[in-house]
Image (tube, grey):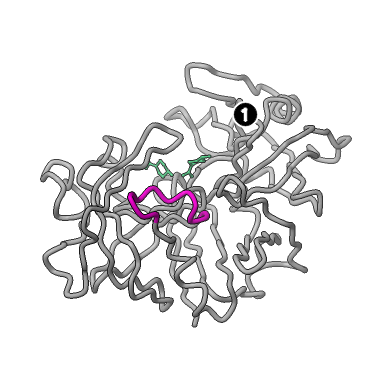
């Protein structure tokens, strides 16, 4: 089978939310290819933590079965996180269905998740080896769904300030231009990881980032690359400054931003449109804008939604590869 759901950008493309049916109840969840837990806001949470959220009502599902003694606890790069107990239930994502999917039921969530009332939890789409359920690690929705999918793939079609889609089991060739290019993924760390050691800013001379690695991460808003790339990129942008107050590089909102090409697994170069690198204004007048490409102090670069807005991405769990092509 296959399944397809909308991916709706929230609050200026900070994150993308998709409807997921769990035991007959539909919640908007954040699909995250950088983690491997499916967890939801639910009726066990304190009233305060539930405020503003659509919660999964554990009493209302006819098919929920609690997993005795199972717990989970997850924290994310930005210090947010959640923890709780675990059950299994039927999960249907746009028609792709898993009858006994581990559903992690938060009994505690961090403030940033409570405040983020658009999101009612996450669907982890990285590799199951990163799943945090104890004592028995659980599989991701994609791992469970794969055997029944027409093709062992899911795709991310994320758009700038427009509704896109996640699809399971098929690659919709009408959604991208030209031929999709593929590269091998290294699953050792549990991410959709590939080497990324070469970059090109506009039509300048390509630059090397020896040992550069990257992950394709729908759960991260920006594109986090090495400081060397960030410096080389914004050297081309008049008025770009690294503003510690704001927390990264800003530039005049009317800047003509160059494209940025990046290496995928040593197999091909993919392009991020300059227009997609203008993330958002930081001032009310809209004169100063925050860059979508920012520095990360690690050689594991994180290619988040800024990259997905320029590239239609296919994740192949059959042969552990990643495909990219410019959006149609
Ligand atoms: C390496 C980190 C990337 C950001 N994360 C995530 N999308 N869940 C956490 C892991
Ligand atoms: C993986 C990310 C999902 C979104 N996050 C959040 N709402 N605090 C951060 C972690």
Residue 252 locus on image (x, y percent): 60, 28
The residue under label 1 is: 298
Q: Is residue 315 above or below residue 260?
A: below
Residue at 27% x, 47% y: name it. 117
Residue 260 falls within the magenta-colored stretch: no
Q: In this rendering, would 164 be left or right of 72? A: right
Q: Is residue 251 visible?
A: no
- Neighbor class of circle 1 (other Cα within 10 Å; few <14, some 14-19, many 20+) is few
For mark 1, give the secondary structure.
loop
Residue 85 locus on image (x, y percent): 23, 51
Q: Is residue 116 visible?
A: yes
Residue 21 locus on image (x, y percent): 31, 70
Which SS does the magenta portion mostly show? loop
Indicate the quadrant containing the C terminus: top left, top right, bottom left or bottom right: bottom right
Q: Is residue 191 above or below residue 59?
A: above
Residue at 40% x, 71% y: name it. 93
Residue 127 locus on image (x, y percent): 52, 55
């Amino acid at each position: 089978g296959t399944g397809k759901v909308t991916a709706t950008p929230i609050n200026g493309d900070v994150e993308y939310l998709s409807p997921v049916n769990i035991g007959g109840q539909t919640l908007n969840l954040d699909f995250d290819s950088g983690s491997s837990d499916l967890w939801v806001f639910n009726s066990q949470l304190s009233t305060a933590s539930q405020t503003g959220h659509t919660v999964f009502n554990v009493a209302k599902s006819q098919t929920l079965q609690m997993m005795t003694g199972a717990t989970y606890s997850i924290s994310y790069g930005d210090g947010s996180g959640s923890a709780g107990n675990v059950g299994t239930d039927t999960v249907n994502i746009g028609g792709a269905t898993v009858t006994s999917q581990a559903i992690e039921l938060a009994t505690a969530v961090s403030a940033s998740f409570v405040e983020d009332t658009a999101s009612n939890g996450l669907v982890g789409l990285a590799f199951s080896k990163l799943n945090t359920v104890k004592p028995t690690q659980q599989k991701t929705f994609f791992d469970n769904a794969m055997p029944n999918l027409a093709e062992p793939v899911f795709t991310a079609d994320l758009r700038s300030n427009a509704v896109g889609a996640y699809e399971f089991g098929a690659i919709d060739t009408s959604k991208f231009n030209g031929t999709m290019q593929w590269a091998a993924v290294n699953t050792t760390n549990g991410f959709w990881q590939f080497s990324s050691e070469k970059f090109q800013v506009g039509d300048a001379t390509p630059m090397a980032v020896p040992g550069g690695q990257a992950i394709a991460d729908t759960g991260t808003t920006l594109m986090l690359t090495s400081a060397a790339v960030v410096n080389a990129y914004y050297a081309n942008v008049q008025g770009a400054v690294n503003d510690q107050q704001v927390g990264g590089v800003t530039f005049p909102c009317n800047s003509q931003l160059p494209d940025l090409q990046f290496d995928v697994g040593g197999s091909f170069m993919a392009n991020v449109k300059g227009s997609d690198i203008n993330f958002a204004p930081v001032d009310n007048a809209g004169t100063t804008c925050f860059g979508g490409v920012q520095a990360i102090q690690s050689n594991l670069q994180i290619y988040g939604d800024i990259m997905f807005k320029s590239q239609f991405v296919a994740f192949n769990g059959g042969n552990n590869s990643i495909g990219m092509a410019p959006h149609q």
